[in-house]
Image: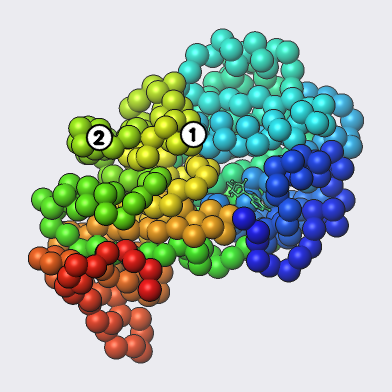
Amino acid sequence: MTPSHPAKHFKDFDLDPRCLKVLRASKITEPTPIQQEAIPAVLTGRDLIATAQTGTGKTLAFALPGLTLLSRSRPGFNRMLVLLPTRELCVQVATVMTAYCKVLNLRCVPIYGGVGMHNQVQRLKKGCEVIVATPGRLLDHLTRKNIEFRNLQILIFDEADRMLDMGFLPDIRRIVKALPAKRQNLMFSATFAPALERLARDMTRNPGRITAGAISKPVDTVRQLVIPVRENDKPTMLVRLLKEENIDSCLIFLRTIRRTEKVGRALKGGRFKTAVIHGDLPQSQRQRALDGFRDGKYQVLVATDVAARGLDVDDVSHVINYDIPENADDYLHRIGRTARAEQEGDALTLVSPSDHAALATIEEALGYNIERRTYDGAPKILTLYRPPGTAAPQVQRKRRGRSLLRRR
Ligand code: AMP
């Protein structure tokens, strides 16, 4: 996985040499665009607002310079706080941070809900420099005085748009009140809706602004396809795709927990190695599903949008939207699970006649029509987004006897 942009090396930045060793051991050689811009900016100690899509390497974009700054400043507990929306993202980011913390003699504690408080309290009592937390559980600890942030130097928002979507804004404002006013603020988000812009304005002082990649556009290496299908034919279509296209690792997204369970059961019955992940499952089961999928024990992970944001699962060759997402933002986050760090990936969206309006919304936001792949008997797609000043694109039909997904 070699990024294909101007070769600036990690050693060109003023990062702690111990971090460079871990990067080398992880075979991470060249900074991605967001890392090229964010690392020097964070190292100056200024506030930063960064528009960055998921899968672009943004965790290291804040972890490397942030931890370098911590390692150079006065010792003390709870000096860096990373706030993020979901438990899965919390575990994932804390795992990355821990690898670098270890070599810098720093400690990192993840704080998230859905598990008992006791272990977290014990770890907080022992003391650590870095806290990676979801807002709800962190606020619980703050209220119970299990934690205080007298020494806080750096506050980081990861996937800030998602935190606001999930209704965390009041929690975030309460947490921020408990922090020292003098601190460095870093905000990373794929989108900046007005409410987030307001929060960013309130929280930051004279921030640097960077944008890595196009705003709200999928990374180039994701190949997107729309597959028209009748609602009743979706199960058959899914099995056909999984079998005929030799799909090794696939994330399948559905709209509701009930449908996720149902499709999960059907695939397990069809002898696909399948795990299911959604918000109603206990944290331990969610983590097992995720770990099993990461380790290759499961070929398929069937998920609601809970799993879509921020998950870093390597080598997902395919994302299948069994249910079309309701808006472009969720679509981008879902398909951002494939083609991470500049690998290639396929994002397939099954579209039934009742999904046309949702598809039109997504295509309007993208500014183009997603390529259609049809098969015998597929329903006609009626709605097509027509970019201003262009003729309506043709819908392809009846690709008899050919792989639906063969690359051209
Ligand atoms: P993130 O956007 O932080 O979730 O990172 C997405 C994936 O890209 C993770 O698997 C990282 O390990 C990987 N990654 C991060 N930075 C680089 C880099 N500079 N070169 C190659 N892979 C990277």
Q: Report which residue position mark 1 lands on.
A: 295
User: Mark 2 belongs to which amino acid?
Assistant: Arg
The image shows residue 241, relative to residue 170, as above or below, that is below
The image shows residue 293, relative to residue 141, as above or below, that is below
Q: Give the crowd class for mark 1: few <14, some 14-19, many >=20 residues within 10 Å.
A: few
Residue 356 coordinates in the image, percent (x, y): 21, 64
Residue 283's quadrant in the figure?
A: top left
Residue 127 coordinates in the image, percent (x, y): 74, 17
Looking at the image, residue 63 sits to the left or right of residue 45; the answer is left
| Mark count | 2
Q: Earlier in the sequence, mark 2 or mark 1?
A: 2
Q: Distance between the residues labelled 2 and 1?
A: 18 Å
Q: Identify the secondary structure beneath mark 2.
A: loop
Q: Identify the secondary structure beneath mark 1.
A: loop
Q: Do the residues labelled 2 and 1 touch (CB within 8 Å)?
A: no
Does residue 86 appear anywhere in the picture? no
Looking at the image, residue 259 sits to the left or right of residue 367; the answer is left
Does residue 370 appear anywhere in the picture? yes
- Residue pictured at 68% horizontal, 17% vertical: 124
Pick the residue in front: 324 or 338. Answer: 338
User: Mark 1 belongs to which amino acid?
Assistant: Asp
Residue 61 coordinates in the image, percent (x, y): 69, 50
Q: Quadrant for the N terminus, please.
A: bottom right
Q: Report which residue position mark 2 lands on.
A: 271
